Image (tube, rainbow, N blue to C red):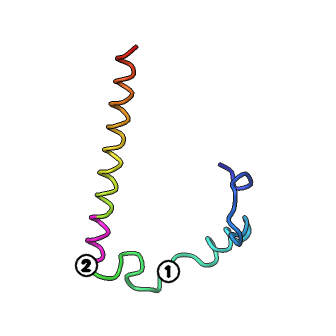
Amino acid sequence: MSEEKRQRAPGEGGRLWAWAYKYLAGPAEGVPGAVQGGSTQAREAWKRDLENRKRWSREQRERKRAEREARRAER
């Protein structure tokens, strides 16, 4: 979806702010551990949470697929 058609939250800014943030602010390279996370426990918790979310998504896809197949079988 193009940025012009997308609804913006109040104070979000426009293309100029998005460009400025992306190219002028840039990533936090000078902060050690900014991308990797703080502690080993925090990283492990994040990985568990991510796997739980992926598992839930897989289960939802399987449930929807089974519902579609059941509807097709009724016809």
Q: Residue at x 29, y 65 (%)?
A: 47
Classified by dominant secondary structure, the portion drawn in magenta counts as: helix
- The residue tagged 1 is 28
Question: Seen in the image, is 31 located left or right of residue 5?
Answer: left
Q: Nearer the viewer, mark 2 or mark 1?
A: 2
Question: Seen in the image, is 7 located left or right of residue 61?
Answer: right
67 is higher (above) or lower (below) than 6? above
Q: CA distance from mark 2 to mark 1?
A: 20 Å
Identified by mark 1, the residue type is: Ala
- SS under mark 2: helix
Residue 1 in percent (x, y) is at 65, 48
Residue 37 in percent (x, y) is at 36, 78
Q: Quadrant of residue 8?
A: bottom right
- SS under mark 1: loop
Badge 2: how crowded within 10 Å, few (<14), some, or many (20+)? few
Residue 19 in percent (x, y) is at 68, 68
Q: Nearer the viewer, residue 49 or 35?
A: 49
The tag on residue 11 is: none
Q: Nearer the viewer, residue 12 or 26?
A: 12
- The residue tagged 2 is 40
Q: Residue at x 29, y 73 (%)?
A: 43
Q: Quadrant of residue 13?
A: bottom right
Is 70 contained in the magenta span?
no
Question: Seen in the image, is 57 located left or right of residue 30?
Answer: left
Q: Which residues are magenta?
A: 40-48
Q: Residue at x 37, y 16 (%)?
A: 74
Q: Residue at x 25, y 71 (%)?
A: 44
